[in-house]
Amino acid sequence: MACERPVNWQKRLARETGGLIWDDETREIFSPDEWHARRVETWKSEVPELARHTTIHAYKNETLVRAITLGITKFGLPDIVIEDLPGMIPGTWES
């Protein structure tokens, strides 16, 4: 599993330096333990589960919502943008 090495290296470096891990593609920050739980431990086959390495951000514009995936580019695919979704997506922002 050649692709698994970077996620383990990042975890080891963060542990040794007392640092955190920033995923620039998903705009998320992780402690070494959380990185291991979400990105390393869940990687059970040669190909990681895409949902564990991506996120979706939603932005409210008056009454409509714009949603964009973040992190899919790590897999050589474009991120997806959906414009003008009706209504609110629970838990994505406060009123």
Image (cartoon, rainbow, N blue to C red):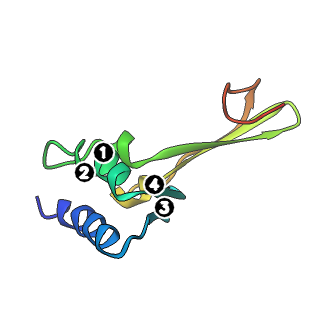
**Which x, y percent locates residue 25?**
48, 61
* Amino acid type assigned to the residue bearing label 2 in the image: Val
Q: Which mark is residue 18?
A: none
Q: Residues within 10 Å of mark 1 (few under 14, many from 20)?
A: few
Q: Measure how far apart labels 3 and 1 are at the Cα level.
A: 18 Å
**Quadrant location of the N terminus in the rendered image:** bottom left
**Which x, y percent locates residue 70?**
52, 52
| Marked residue nearer the N-terminal end (2 or 3) | 3
* Amino acid type assigned to the residue bearing label 4 in the image: Gly
The secondary element bearing badge 4 is classed as: loop
Q: Nearer the viewer, mark 3 or mark 1?
A: 1
| Labels 3 and 4 touching (C-beta < 8 A) | yes
Q: Nearer the viewer, mark 4 or mark 2?
A: 2
59 over 30 or under it: above or below: above
Residue annotated with mark 4: 71
Q: Which mark is residue 40?
A: 2
User: Foreground: 78 or 15?
Assistant: 15
Q: Going 34% across and 45% down the picture, which residue do you hit? A: 38
Image quarter of residue 87? top right
The secondary element bearing badge 2 is classed as: helix
Relative side of 1 to 68, left or right:
left
54 over 2 or under it: above or below: above
| Labels 2 and 3 touching (C-beta < 8 A) | no
Q: Is residue 76 visible?
A: no
Relative side of 19 to 6, left or right:
right
Extreme right residue here? Answer: 62
Residue annotated with mark 3: 25
